[in-house]
Amino acid sequence: MFPVIRVEQIGDYEGQEVTIRGWVYNRTHKGKLVFLLMRDGYGFAQCVGFKNDLPADLFDAMTRIPQESSVIVTGVVRADPRAPGIPGGYEVGITGFEVVQAVEGEYPIALKEHGVEFLLDNRHLWIRTPSQWAVLRVRAVVIAAIHEWLADNGFIHMDTPILTPAACEGTTTLFGTEYFDEGVAYLAQSGQLYNEANIFAFSRVYCFGPTFRAEKSKTRRHLTEFWMVEPEIAFCDLDGVMEIEEQFVSHIVQTALKKCAPELKALGRDVTALERVTPPFPRISYDDALAMLAEIRAQTEDPEAKALLDIEWGMDFGSPHETALTKKFDKPVFVYGYPTAVKAFYMEPWPGRPEVCKSVDLLAPEGYGEIIGGSERISDPDLLLQHIHEHNLPEEAFKWYIDLRRYGSVPHSGFGLGVERTVTWICGIDHLREAIAYPRMINRVYP
Ligand code: 4AD
Ligand code: MG
């Protein structure tokens, strides 16, 4: 009996005979040698069978084993810098080979180019592919780093409801569902409003759950179901929340660099851009961002690109604006003080300038754009009620929320970080749909 290893730790077993349980990702056969690229869930390792060292029937079985068959391989680990794999650099000289299940017929995702819709239809299989596997491993590390930083900084994790009576982030993206005799309930767009109740009991809290937006736009940055972590902090203003965000995001990125080097390498990610992600991050106002955009626009020659950069004071940024702005910075950048009219009802107005609010978005560099939305919240009950009316929101559903401003109101702030946006940026991939195992989009709920 030999130790069953996890391929991610293969380097610890150099010179030893080990067992790998997994699946045949790829097979090539050259004369007296057969190469099996094995994946065991923890990594990918090249295993080599040499005809002269093995019983004829075993060698023969290896030369014919179909892609994705489940097998148990035994062999001796040796260092070889050329050996492919994740982490790679080690090869296994096969001494034993057992088939658990030989695949019959062709595996749908044969090793050739496929269209993305086909791959998404086969997402249940596609996640086995190295690039997809690597992204989802990074995602798991990002989520663990989120919990770790928050726990270390005095935040307690509170679960907030998914079925809710009211909108948090605008009424146009609500998913409604019939709820017995209570009328319509909505899938949560955010847990923020409940976080705001929770801080008055626990001071620093966060919720972390799936959130839902009936986003009608088909973009590479939008899902209809996505995961968001939302910290909320009592006695915290806009500057305070930016300080927390830059510490938090830096920890997430640095943890991913430390723990996911093989995955990021497999994805071909240039990590130097990530290494720069340390506090402090630059902070610019919406007004200054507009001026920067006007300058970028003036320097843009292509008329189509120029038109995309059109913007007037009062408009929210679209992807082209965010992309252009972030290319001017080599770190994530805070843009604060957006026009009140484009932001949510709960945001504290700028003192003496009510057309601007104490909101802040964090935009990721390299063109990735918004990964965090946050703000200081209105702390005055009368002003809050006025905003609820101005947004035509049902006062009844917000009664409890206004209560929070009646009993011990304090300045408070919070933010939401989108997990898929963050993972997409860290992995350097193009589309949010690859940053979640089973993406939900306007035209997709399968598989
Ligand atoms: O800016 P948003 O809408 O802010 C809120 O929901 C606040 N209630 C958060 C808070 O202050 N507690 O969303 C926050 C983040 C965005 O920056 C983005 O990363 C992500 O959530 N996000 C989406 N990700 C994927 N698909 C979508 N449709 C998303 N909408 C927002
Ligand atoms: Mg936002």
Image: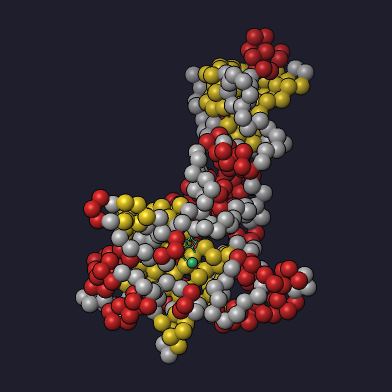
Residue at x 64% of width, y 47% of height: 267
Viewer-nearest residue: 153 or 432: 432
Q: Position of residue 294 (x, y in %)?
A: 67, 80
Count the marks.
Answer: 0
**Residue 235 location, quadrant:** bottom left
Viewer-nearest residue: 45 or 412: 412
Q: Left or right: 253 with respect to 354? A: right
Work out whether 128 lies above or below 238: above
Q: Is residue 395 visible?
A: yes
Work out whether 206 lies above or below 379: above
Work out whether 315 lies above or below 332: below
**Residue 291 location, quadrant:** bottom right
Q: Is residue 231 visible?
A: no
Looking at this rendering, what residue extends furthest in the left direction?
407
Residue at x 58% of width, y 57% of height: 219
Q: Position of residue 283 (x, y in %)?
A: 54, 76
**Residue 233 location, quadrant:** bottom left
Viewer-nearest residue: 16 or 415: 415
Q: Position of residue 163 (x, y in %)?
A: 32, 54
Residue at x 46% of width, y 84% of height: 355
Coloring basis for residues: secondary structure
Q: Position of residue 343 (x, y in %)?
A: 46, 73
Looking at this rendering, what residue extends furthest in the bottom direction?
352
Residue at x 56% of width, y 67% of height: 363
